[in-house]
Image (tube, grey):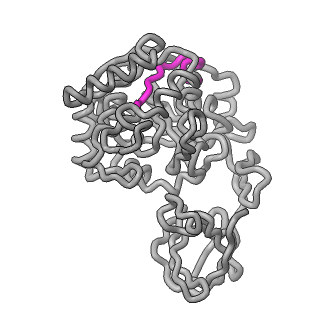
Amino acid sequence: MASWRKGRVTEILEERPDLLRARVDVDGQYVAVAAFPSMVGSIEVGDMLVINTTGLDLDLGTGGFGFVLWNLDSKALPQPGEGHIVKMRYTPWQTEVLAAEAPESPHHDQLVRADSLDGMPVVVCSLHSQMAAAVAGIKAAKPDARVGYLMTDGAALPLAWSNLVRQLKDQALIDVTCTSGHASGGDLESVNVFSGLVALRHVAEADIVVAAMGPGIVGTGTRLGFTGMEQGQVLDAVTALGGHSIACLRISFADDRERHRGVSHHSLTALTIAARERAVVAVPGLQDQWLEQVRVQLAAAGIDRRHNVVEADGGPGIGMLRSHGIEPTSMGRKFDEIQELFLAAAAAGAIATERL
């Protein structure tokens, strides 16, 4: 069951049109909370809030925030959305959006029969943080490429929760976003991954797309129980739509867990069980012993037979991120502590530009 508490706002920490952060007094304890104005309306100092504290109680990676369900003193309720497609259906947070492919959308006629990516390259990541290096790898190789980001509903559902996406858009490394499934808040909304990819190609006129879930991957320590399995399914969707699918490997030599050391079992499993179609698998330039381990792991899993393994330099993409002052983190590790993870993504971005 979810954990619910009441608390009174003592300070507004940050206020944007799509996200508000505040400090709340909950029975004498100060708690940081986040709210999405499109769902709860306005919030002011002194308001009494109903807060979901589940993530805090379980010590999950939510950034130390509770989430506001309702403002009991609200002076401005959220307004209805423009469309009739409901996301987060049959929950208290269900909300209507204007999906790009919906009949009331100005793009409906353009998308009514669209079912091809016309050879568009798509980089598919299994971690949200890697998306930053992937788009940087693209821009480093092709500065004029129009880059789209497709956020699936595998993790965080509101796009506003990603500070990384906001940074990348502010720095013009991402040109347009689309949120698919129950994820919401993108420049475009879509009903599923297939229609989201097509909308980015034909409506947003993206040259290349990077697809990944939002922040908050889930894992269970079992072979199949992790959100990153979706990587294989998204790769297959790209192939089915006539695009070039490029897989970004999850690589770490900083992780003490054996199942994630070198090439993570998340990547190996997604590419051998979930992905049924042939894709390009990007391998970054690494120091010799690390690169050899990656090659051995891919061969042992049969990935070098099932897919096209291509090696590329991720360095320019990392340089691009640094030049823009963007240093993503992953699983609590700083950029410099796990550069191989981001080199892998930047290499995938560089390879994608070769398929333009």
- Give percent across and percent down for residue 343: 29, 35
The front one of 294 and 12 is: 294
Q: Confirm whether the magenta stretch covers residue 241.
A: yes
The front one of 274 and 326 is: 274
Identify the residue at horizontal 34%, vertical 20% (top origin). Answer: 296
Identify the residue at horizontal 22%, vertical 34% (top origin). Answer: 315
Direction from residue 344 to residue 165 in the image, left or right: right
Answer above or below: position of 17 versus 121.
below
Residue 76 in view in this figure: no
Quadrant housing the C terminus: top left
Direction from residue 327 to residue 186 in the image, left or right: right
Q: Which residue lies furthest to the right in this view?
A: 90
Number of callouts in the render? Answer: 0
Q: Which residue lies furthest to the left in this view?
A: 288
- Give percent across and percent down for residue 91: 76, 56
The front one of 282 and 37 is: 282
Answer above or below: position of 339 versus 116.
below
- Give percent across and percent down for residue 27: 61, 87
Which quarter of the figure has residue 172? Answer: top left
- Give percent across and percent down for residue 84: 76, 47
Identify the residue at horizontal 35%, vertical 50% (top origin). Answer: 328
Residue 287 in view in this figure: yes
Q: Residue furthest top?
A: 305
Identify the residue at horizontal 29%, vertical 34% (top origin). Answer: 143
Quadrant housing the N terminus: bottom right
Q: Confirm whether the magenta stretch covers residue 181.
A: no
Direction from residue 1 to residue 330 in the image, left or right: left
The magenta span reads: 237-249
Answer above or below: position of 222 versus 74.
above
